[in-house]
Image (spheres, helix red, strand yellow):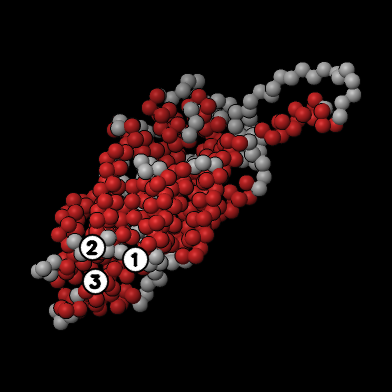
Amino acid sequence: MPRITLLRQLLEARHLTTHRAFEAQFLRAARRLAAEVDDPGLASVAVSSRQFDRWMGGELKNLPRPDTCRVLEELLGRTAEELFAPTSAEHGIAAPEPAKISLVHAVCPVADDENPVGIITRARELSCGNADEATLTLLASQLDEIADRYEMDGPHGLSGQAKSLRKLGHTLLAGQQPPSARRELFRITARAGGLLGYMAVNTGNFPLAEAYCAEALELSRAIGDLDTELWAGGTLSFALYYTGRYDEADARAAAAVDRSPNHPQAIRLLVNGRARALAKLGDRKRTERAIRQALDLSDRHDVAPGLTSCISFGPYGRARTLANAVTARVALKDAAHVLREAEHLDELIEESDSAWSRSLVRLDVATALLQQRAPDVEHAMTLGREAVAFAAPLPISSVRQRSQDLYERAAPWRSRPAVREYGEQLRAWGCRTSPVVAR
């Protein structure tokens, strides 16, 4: 009979019981860890199918190589010593020894609630719960999976998974857990609700978005989880922006920034929440100040240079910050600045997997080309057509809205073939879209 280890328990819980499934997640964790610790060698760490089979069978005399252990710890959130230790088959985690307690006969009769055996039994019941560490690890991994897949599958493809995750969180919270597990369940459930709030903005259901964000804020505040609280505040500002409530969007983002001005989440709050709303209000001075503050925080926190997922709980990467700054400056009609920034942004955007961002940046640049003193109509229409083509597989209303705005801005040149072709493409695309909102 194979020796049961915590490693095997966690891999079974994540449905990573074949080498192919495990290898994909292991390599992703290796690349992520290599980037985090600035050690490129970790990205090439691999596990052979034979080694994987030995691990699943519990056939291990010594721990794997240190670099392999580091990646496993990144993937599964436990130390290598814990992962390869035998576990309790009943509980799925290393079973602690029960407390050694000497129970002596009482000199005199005791009340029921003072019975020594009852006291210890109740203490042990309270220290257990309905969510062991393997379950919590699995639920947390679902949050990461949704964020990683979001810009490929969109809200319609992932909302069911997020709803199931939130429902399970509520079900487990109705039971009993020790404090550390309960806090983690609060965090997971708050973030699942937050994801659904973001998706509700994307699908245009703004009342539902506000409700989900309110839940995420309530749960995160209950456990003092500032990171999730600020993210949920930014998502609520995001919802208010797309309903045209720019004053409220700015106020909500500003209040969240005031909670922790130097927090990494403040980057998103400043550039996606404040700068874009202030630009819509025509407040150039405060827009530029918010953009500068966001970029300064990006430098101080050394964020990723590339385009992070729009729904990620991590801090905004520099490319996404710059893309939001470009959108704000389009609203201010600062065409020269938009075109300069777009040149620096272009390579980062094109290397990303985000078709939404490629579409939206193209439309921002196309609008700026028409805002110039000498408008470049043909180039603007080419970018507009590319944006529509990128968005066609997963239509989003922000692209459709901006593409329609671009066509209306091109009204003085409607007689030109480039504008007519763009209008025809736009009409054909608009007839078959079911819109959602992005960025």
Circle 1 crowding by C-alpha within 10 Å: few under 14, some 14–19, many from 20: some
Q: Amino acid at mark 3?
A: Leu
Q: What separation in Å lies between label 2 and label 3 (alpha carbons)?
A: 15 Å
Residue of label 2:
332
Which residue is pictured at 44% across the width and 57% down the height? 236
| SS of the residue under disc 3 | helix
Circle 1 sits in a helix, a strand or a loop, which is it? helix
Foreground tag (2 vs 3): 2
Q: Is residue 204 visible?
A: yes
Residue 11 coordinates in the image, percent (x, y) = 51, 38
x, y (%) of residue 230? Answer: 43, 48
Amino acid type, callout 1: Ser
Q: Residue at x 80, y 30 (%)?
A: 118
Q: Which residue is mark 1?
A: 398
**Among the two numbered marks 2 and 1 on one chain, the one whose residue lies closer to the N terminus:** 2
Residue found at x 75% / y 27%: 120
Q: Is residue 52 left or right of residue 89?
A: left
Q: Residue furthest bottom?
A: 415
Q: CA distance from mark 3 to mark 1?
A: 12 Å
- With respect to residue 303, does 389 lie above or below? below
- Residue toward you, 282 or 23: 282
- Name the residue carrying label 3: 406
Q: Is residue 216 above or below residue 59?
A: below
Residue type at the position of mark 2: Leu
Dots 2, 1 in contact, CB < 8 A:
no
